[in-house]
Image: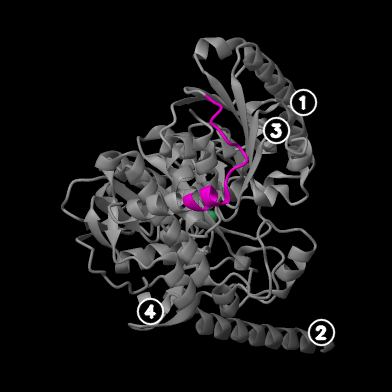
């Protein structure tokens, strides 16, 4: 740890540095803390986003199946959607893809009503694409105020298309670890 | 008269067959029995004590289930971790990673426990009808090293017969009878259970009595198996596993994250996480020798993972890992495990600094991937 932690931190910062040099498409922070992290598609990718937020010291609560009715009570000031389908995750939660999409849409509608900004992340790359995941992507991405995607998940430009050619700011990163920098920049 | 002659020739034939059978038995028995001789492992510079698993559960003392537990104690405050190799003795990257750790690691903070052959009985035989070699050889820096290659489950010589249906004791889950001898379906084990359940119980007892913070069970899987090149984690171990995967990604090693299914019982990542305070994790690497699509099964396949049938399987989209003519060599699979272990320890230290486990002397993923295992054994 004593040896590895500084290396890991340096690499994270280097990652952030490269991303900064390229410049993000999101020009100013949009989201307020604390945030609520939820899954759209119930994949384990939500765990990776929790690490990014933890390491960036963003204050958050996580509930993979957060529901609209309970949003106000969480005191959250923004919403993070971790997008990508997992049949295993849905199976373990005992819900269908359709039910999860409807839940996410209801949650987003409630967040809008409460004036919360919504950040969408797709960090699963190529493995989190295909018929099932794409349902969640096409359903959730157009509802976001800002989207971050790991590049291998956007080889066909689906995210650019869904973000309406610049209507929703979209940032693409090479690795999950690199998603930390733009994500942190999105928070005030 | 004629009948009599026929009778005689039958008798002669029987005698000839019997003689052939005896010759075959005499010829193969030394090799079969040799598998009961333990591999010679080098005691690394960090090993402070070699204990026996029976120290934590005396009932298995003197049985084929007892096995060595290497303890590497830094003498400095910190956390503790248990590495399990050889839960399945036909998954060599698992136990070779454990052996590489015990022969190289120097603990700088905390305590490390290593059981290279968690199911020692499974290492005493090879699966019938599989044609898998019973050993493989490495020209290591310390000289020629021969390592045994065993089976998935406890030897039927030590636990027999199998029931038609294996009922997991604490959940009532029903599996095929042969799973009765699978250590990774026996957790948390039973003091009065069968041979395999008692090994599991001894490991669970070690974790409880010595307050092990992290338990990592090292496995391999067939390339056509969906959970592969992945860390499987109990829900309490999720922050450790996801942190480790991020650390590995920064080093250029891609590892998947698999939550331990709540309904799949008897596995280390489920039961040890549920019934002890340890953070339970399991790692999988791709091993063609266990696969159903494999062709010729020899020592080279164990060491190189090169198999034209798997290259074909990849092209047909039947695999869950990339597979080309370069294969998946043993040293690369061990590199993933060793790199994974270090990434797990780093992530754990970031989450619980006072429970850090810090190791020196361990080759990095890149060193193992480029130089192979030989310089470190
Ligand atoms: Zn296994």
The residue that label 1 is drawn on is: A98
The chain containing the residue under callout 4 comes to: B
- C-alpha gap between disc 3 and disc 4: 53 Å
Instruction: Report the span colored magenta.
Output: A17-31
Q: Nearer the viewer, residue B79 or A81?
A: A81
Q: Nearer the viewer, residue B336 or B250?
A: B250
Residue plotted at (60% across, 23% down): A117
Residue B190 in sight in this render: yes
Residues at badges 3 and 1 in contact (C-beta under 8 Å)?
A: no
Secondary structure beneath dot 1 equals helix
Residues at badges 3 and 4 in contact (C-beta under 8 Å)?
A: no
Q: Are marks 3 and 1 on the same chain?
A: yes
Residue B180 in sight in this render: no
Does A125 sit above or below residue B116?
above
- Extreme residue in the left direction: B75
User: Dot 3: few (<14), some (14–19), or many (≥20) neighbours within 10 Å?
Assistant: many
Please say whether residue A96 is one of the residues in the magenta stretch: no
The residue that label 4 is drawn on is: B375
The chain containing the residue under callout 3 comes to: A
- C-alpha gap between disc 4 and disc 1: 54 Å
User: Dot 4: few (<14), some (14–19), or many (≥20) neighbours within 10 Å?
Assistant: few
Residue plotted at (63% across, 27% down): A93
Q: Nearer the viewer, residue A128 or B60?
A: A128
Secondary structure beneath dot 2 equals helix
Please say whether residue A25 is one of the residues in the magenta stretch: yes
* Left or right, A16 with reference to B74: right
In the image, which is nearer the foreground, mark 4 or mark 2? 4
The residue that label 2 is drawn on is: B3
Does B9 sit above or below residue A9?
below
- Extreme residue in the right direction: B2
Q: Where residue A168 is drawn, which disc sits there?
A: 3
């Amino acid at each position: 740890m004593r040896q590895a932690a500084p290396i890991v931190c340096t690499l994270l910062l280097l990652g952030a540095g490269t991303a900064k040099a390229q410049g993000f498409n999101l020009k100013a922070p949009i989201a307020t803390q604390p945030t609520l992290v939820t899954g759209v598609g119930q994949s384990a990718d939500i765990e990776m986003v929790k690490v990014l937020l933890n390491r960036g010291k963003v204050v958050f609560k996580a509930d993979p199946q957060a529901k609209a009715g309970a949003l106000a009570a969480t005191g959250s000031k923004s919403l993070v959607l971790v997008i990508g389908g997992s049949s295993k995750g849905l199976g373990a939660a005992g819900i269908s893809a359709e039910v999860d999409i409807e839940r996410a849409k209801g949650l987003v509608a409630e967040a809008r009503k409460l004036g919360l900004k919504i950040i969408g992340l797709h960090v699963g790359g190529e493995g989190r694409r295909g018929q099932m995941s794409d349902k969640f992507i096409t359903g959730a991405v157009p509802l976001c105020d800002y989207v971050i995607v790991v590049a291998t998940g956007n080889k066909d430009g689906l995210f650019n298309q869904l973000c309406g050619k610049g209507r929703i700011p979209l940032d693409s990163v090479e690795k999950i670890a690199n998603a930390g920098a733009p994500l942190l920049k999105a928070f005030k | 008269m004629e009948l009599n002659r026929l009778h005689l020739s039958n008798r002669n034939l029987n005698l000839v067959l019997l003689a052939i059978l005896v010759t075959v038995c005499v010829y193969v028995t030394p090799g079969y029995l040799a598998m009961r001789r333990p591999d010679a492992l080098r005691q690394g510079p960090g090993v402070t004590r070699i204990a026996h698993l029976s120290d934590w559960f005396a009932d298995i003392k003197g049985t084929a289930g007892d096995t060595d537990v290497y303890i590497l104690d830094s003498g400095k405050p910190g956390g503790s971790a248990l590495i399990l190799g050889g839960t399945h003795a036909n998954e060599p990257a698992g136990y070779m990673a454990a052996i590489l750790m015990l022969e190289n690691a120097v603990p700088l903070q905390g305590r490390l426990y290593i059981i290279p052959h968690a199911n020692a009985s499974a290492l005493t035989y090879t699966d019938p009808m599989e044609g898998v070699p019973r050993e493989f050889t490495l020209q290591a820096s310390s000289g020629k090293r021969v390592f045994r290659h065993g089976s998935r489950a406890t030897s039927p010589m030590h636990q027999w017969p199998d029931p038609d249906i294996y009922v997991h004791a604490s959940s009532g889950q029903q599996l095929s009878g042969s799973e009765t001898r699978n250590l990774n379906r026996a957790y948390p084990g039973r003091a009065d259970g069968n041979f395999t359940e008692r090994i599991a119980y001894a490991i669970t007892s070690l974790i409880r009595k010595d307050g092990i913070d992290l338990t990592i069970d090292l496995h391999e899987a067939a390339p056509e198996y969906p959970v592969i090149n992945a860390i499987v984690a109990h829900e309490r171990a999720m922050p450790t596993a996801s942190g480790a995967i991020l650390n590995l990604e920064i080093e250029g090693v891609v590892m998947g994250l698999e939550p331990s299914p709540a309904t799949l019982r008897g596995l280390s990542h489920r039961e040890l996480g549920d019934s002890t305070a340890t953070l339970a994790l399991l790692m999988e690497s791709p091993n063609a020798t266990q696969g159903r699509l494999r062709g010729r099964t020899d020592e080279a396949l164990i060491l190189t993972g090169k198999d034209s049938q798997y290259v074909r399987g990849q092209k047909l989209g039947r695999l869950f890992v990339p597979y080309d003519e370069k294969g998946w060599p043993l040293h690369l699979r061990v590199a993933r495990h060793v790199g994974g272990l270090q990434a797990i320890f780093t992530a754990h230290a970031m989450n619980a600094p006072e429970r850090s486990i810090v190791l020196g002397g361990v080759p990095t993923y890149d060193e193992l991937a480029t130089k192979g295992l030989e310089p470190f054994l």
